[in-house]
Image: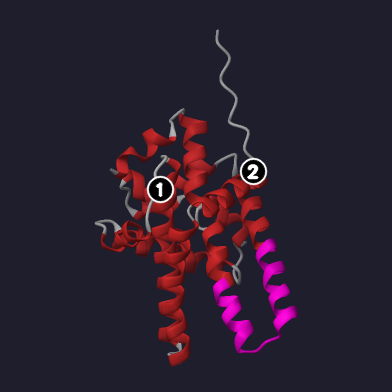
Amino acid sequence: MTAPLSPPPWTATSVLQRSYQMARDNFPAFVTVTLIFAAVTAVVDVLSLGLLGGLVHLLAGVATAICLTWATLQALAGNRPDWEPILRQLQGPLFGRLLLLGVIQYLVIALSTILVIPPFFLLPLWAVTVPAMMVERLDIGGAFSRSADLTRGRRLPILGAFLLWFVFFLVGGWLILALFGHGALARLLLAVYGAVAAIVVQPLPAIFYVLLREEKEGMTAGQITAALD
């Protein structure tokens, strides 16, 4: 009897390194998209729109995640997506459903910080909801269930990758404040830094999704992303 194939050897650090390499290889397109959304939120901040401004921040963050998830899936399939087709995902047939999924996921994880369910449990549990919905055309409940199934047994390295990114992000932000203080220049640099840092963390869900399906279902990146064509 043939022994089952062992899972691909990926860890939190190797996945974060892969995400960094993807961000570097696709830097012009990825950073253009994040800076466009960052500019929208910057205008909102200047206008001091209060609760409405917070909603715009949330929607812009989710829209950025949707666009870069699609771009990452394309890159994993061997393509080099440009910023214009990435932004056109805002007009895609699944965009409204993906946006609602992202908003629900963000709000539940945010609320979990003050309730009994720790966010450290929910973050890896729902790590691949967006790419699962995008590729498999699932409804919202199906996306949450699919993510829970795919991440089972691999949630610790998934959480580790997000935590490693967060540590690096905090260190970078602290260095900017230490060097430039808390004035207007520092705020501008932090906004740009946040947009650049986003292109490293935003590809993680798509990378995890492909790795998990390769590992558990024996599929290739090309087979997985073929549904996007």
Q: Is 10 placed left or right of 125 in the picture?
A: right
Residue 229 sits in quarter: top left
Magenta segment, principal secondary structure?
A: helix
- Residue at the image position 44 percent from the left and 31 percent from the top: 220
- Residue at the image position 60 percent from the left and 25 percent from the top: 6
Instruction: Evaluate if marks 1 and 2 touch, with contact meaning CB atoms under 8 Å apart.
Output: no
Residue 162 visible, this angle: yes
Q: Is 165 placed left or right of 134 in the picture?
A: right
Q: How is the image coloured?
A: secondary structure
Q: Is residue 127 magenta?
A: no
Residue type, mark 2 in image: Ser
Q: Please tell me which residue lies in front, 28 or 163.
A: 28
Q: Is residue 178 magenta?
A: yes
What residue is disc 2 on?
Answer: 14
What residue is disc 1 on?
Answer: 80
Q: Secondary structure at mark 1?
A: loop
Q: Nearer the viewer, mark 1 or mark 2?
A: 1
- The residue sitting at the top extreme is 1
What span is colored magenta in the figure?
Answer: 167-192
